[in-house]
Amino acid sequence: MTKRDVHVVPQLGGLVAPLAYVPDPGLATPRHAHKKNKVDSPCDEESLRDSSLPNMVVPVREQLMGKKVMSFGQLADLDVGLDAGWSSSSSDEELEDRTALPPLVAYKDIETGKRQSLVEKMLLSAWDEKNDRGLFKYDVSQCLSKKVPGRFEFVAQLNEGRAQKKRQTEFKMDDVCQAFDTKKFNFTKAKQDEVLFQFEMSVDDFTSCYEENKIVESNASFVYINISPIEYGHVLLVPKVLKCIPQQMSTECLLTALHMSVEVHNPCFKFGFNTLGAYASINHLHFQGYFLNAPFPVERVETEYLSVFSERGNKDLRVSKLVDYPVRAFVFELGSDLKELAREVSLACNKLELKNIPYNLLIVDCGARVFLFPQKFDENKRLNAIPEEILDTQVNPACFEIGGHMVMKRKEDYENLTEGMICKILSYASLTETEFKAVELDLFS
């Protein structure tokens, strides 16, 4: 087993949970049906009444063990040519040419018989189907990606399409908690054709199962494609979509994202969350996720255990803070109770919301670790504290950028990007040491 094969694997009762799905090469993937409804119709309650959509059912796994070991090792361990540029995904011709450089960034199953969870298999096959039908605003496979030389091994992508075609923010940035506004864009206005499947957590099932059609219920959670993708398999998880919850954290909704991370069961899959003021563009509770065939730089950063948290008597869940990274952050590590992890992270998030402090979340290691980044980039922008050279890059650091996957919008910025420049950009998102210490005491003492 190589370093990159070793990762955090959530386990059930000391044994690997029954997540691995071995695809049968001779078995056709079920089609993603939308019966009794018009695919161009929106996802509002009226349009969905008596409609059916594909449904992914997963078991509730509250008792898990996060087996914490090194994720991936060094990026250099990946079998890629690091001194050359390459596209995020490979064309069919490239995949047939065994001498072609494998992609650095986008994860895509190209090996017959590769072990996949059912959730991962259905997510990727449905995403490919939407891509083949031209539902995305641009072809993300044409975006260049590279490793940026340096200690952190940042990953950069040139994504000019996202800069030109991404939906613009419709609300003010200086207020984290804003009421849901039905007049502004939300996911009930997205087309039903953009839905991959419903995502249901069941206490009655022990393994995942896929239903071609299920009547949409009022508390359904949807997984949508992101029509302006950053990477392969870029999706949006919207818990209880018809409840129209604003972009503020709750234990129940975070638990949904953690369960999906567990069920995808691939450390290449990352989930992120941005608040208003931390570059969420839609005030409708949602998580973003995609596949990155490299560790986020923040995943390898050294951490320091928070003694103030241990004094609260929780000996199972571990909370640390990053050491020597451009953005100060807290790290929550799974003990044995997934619900407890969701509860503690949500509690910290809610305290930040009450103090009007924007933040980003990054969920990695199949749901076993959650990074919490309080941030102030937009505040510094409003205070004219950010140099023009940084503003000119048009980088608004959200969860993925802060984690170390830099999405650049201009070719010249991508080509000239250095580790020093990335650290400088990200530093303006970070709280000062004094501010971070005050937040630490507020959240955990």
Image (tube, rainbow, N blue to C red):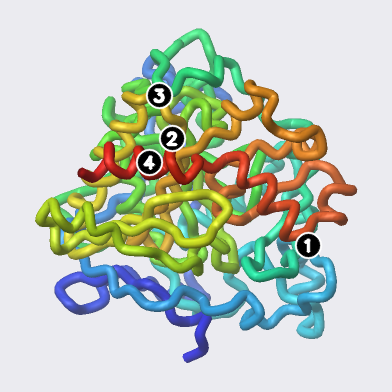
Residue nearest the observer in this picture, 32 or 391: 391
- First in sequence: mark 2 or mark 4? 4
Q: Can residue 196 be seen by looking at this rendering? A: no
- First in sequence: mark 4 or mark 3? 4
For the residue carrying disc 4, how many other residues have a C-alpha within 10 Å: few (<14), some (14-19), or many (20+)? Answer: many
Residue designated by label 4: 198
Q: Residue furthest right?
A: 412
Mark 2 residue type: His
Q: Percent x, y for residue 105?
A: 66, 64
- Residue at the spot 50% in from the left edge and 69% down from the top edge: 300
Mark 1 residue type: Ser
Foreground label between 4 and 1: 1
Quarter of the figure with residue 58? bottom left
Mark 3 residue type: Asn
Residue nearest the observer in this picture, 272 or 383: 383
* Residue 286 disc label: 2
- Give the structural element (helix, strand or loop) at label 4: strand
- First in sequence: mark 4 or mark 1? 1
Q: Percent x, y for residue 84?
A: 84, 72
Left or right: 337 as drawn, with respect to 24? left
Quarter of the image with the C terminus in it: top left
Measure the alpha-carbon separation of dots 1 and 2. Answer: 28 Å
Residue designated by label 1: 87
Measure the alpha-carbon separation of dots 3 and 1. Answer: 39 Å
Measure the alpha-carbon separation of dots 4 and 1. Answer: 31 Å
For the residue carrying disc 1, how many other residues have a C-alpha within 10 Å: few (<14), some (14-19), or many (20+)? Answer: many
Q: Residue furthest bottom?
A: 1
Residue designated by label 3: 356
Measure the alpha-carbon separation of dots 4 and 3. Answer: 32 Å
Measure the alpha-carbon separation of dots 3 and 2. Answer: 19 Å
- Give the structural element (helix, strand or loop) at label 3: loop
